[in-house]
Amino acid sequence: MDIEKFLAPEGVKLNLKNHKTDFTGDYKDKKAAEVDLQKNIEKLAELQDVLYADNKHALLIIFQAMDAAGKDGAIKHVMSGLNPQGVQVFSFKQPSTEELDHDYLWRCAKSAPERGRLGIFNRSYYEEVLVVRVHEAILQSQLLPENVTKDKNIWKKRFTQIKNYEDYLSENGIHVIKFFLNVSKDEQKKRFLARIDEAEKNWKFSAGDAKERAFWDDYMKCYEEAISATSTKNAPWYVVPADKKWFTRTAVSEIIVKKLESLNLKYPTISETQRAELLKAKEILESEK
């Protein structure tokens, strides 16, 4: 799969209208994609083991999307073969009172993965340049200083702050890749209706989800600007088609595998002294009756 097709190039203005939401590449059907997904799941398990043993790198994977785009499903399926001990998943919803008393990066920064692990953010600090920008009343309600709430350049400043933070992570061994699951408005409607019609999915839907559709164009504009401003070599954005869940999951798995492979992960080597100690321990174990 040519993953470069989904990469948002650094410094290039993104136009989401140029990205097909129902794109499926060379796959003719779901079965072929699922075969590749399974191969990637197995490869991820191998790479995770080396990542943990190497203990020099971490990978932070950020998922952003409109409601019902498939973030939960992508996380569940792509990560299904991983060792839970080496994966941390955080879902960021409406900030708590404690979180609002800190800077907007705080709650995510304290959840960043340590070296040797995979960290997954289901939504992230990008909500502060997306939903907060679409609904500026939220910003006004956060009791921030007036020089912040009345700053006409607040969004550009936050883009810079986010880029600097992600550069900081990368320079400290925590690599970042970001996914925007690009679902169409029509497909979102179908999924919302399914959540209403299927009793076991009712819990996933609220009236507020439908109301947010009125701001669809505003969200698209904010996503375009946020992705354009923050897709960098250290922390690239991938705009992944999300109308076909099976393709989304395969594409996401492919991108993660290639990122981990690019880190040149290796199992640690031991010194001659350590080797001699191992051989001595082996002799003792073999001599036991």
Image: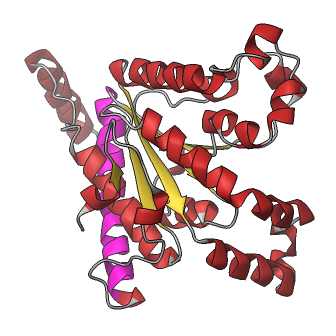
Residue 130 image position (x, y, % from top left): 66, 41
Can the viewer see residue 81 in this picture? no
Does the magenta portion include 49? yes
Q: Is residue 39 left or right of residue 194?
A: left
Locate the N terminus by quadrant.
bottom left
Residue 240 image position (x, y, % from top left): 44, 62
Q: Quadrant of residue 31?
A: bottom left
Q: Is residue 42 left or right of residue 263?
A: right
Q: Is residue 201 left or right of residue 258?
A: right
Does the magenta portion include 153? no
Q: For the point 91% across and 65% down, which residue is it? A: 207
Q: Is residue 276 left or right of residue 181?
A: left
Q: For the point 62% across and 27% down, which residue is it? A: 155
Is 245 placed above or below 151 here?
A: below
Q: How is the image coloured?
A: secondary structure
Q: For the point 52% across and 60% down, which residue is it? A: 181
- In magenta, the rendered stretch is 32-56
Query: Main SS of the magenta segment?
Result: helix
Question: Can you name the residue that lies furthest to the left here?
Answer: 272
Q: Which of the pair 79/204 is nearer the observer?
A: 204
Residue 151 image position (x, y, % from top left): 71, 16
Is 268 placed above or below 82 here?
A: above
Locate the C terminus by quadrant.
top left
Q: Give the total of numbered labels.
A: 0
Q: Quadrant of residue 263?
A: top left
Residue 287 image position (x, y, % from top left): 21, 37
Is 170 placed above or below 119 here?
A: above
Can the viewer see residue 179 in this picture? yes
Is 169 placed above or below 81 here?
A: above
Q: Quadrant of residue 173?
A: top left
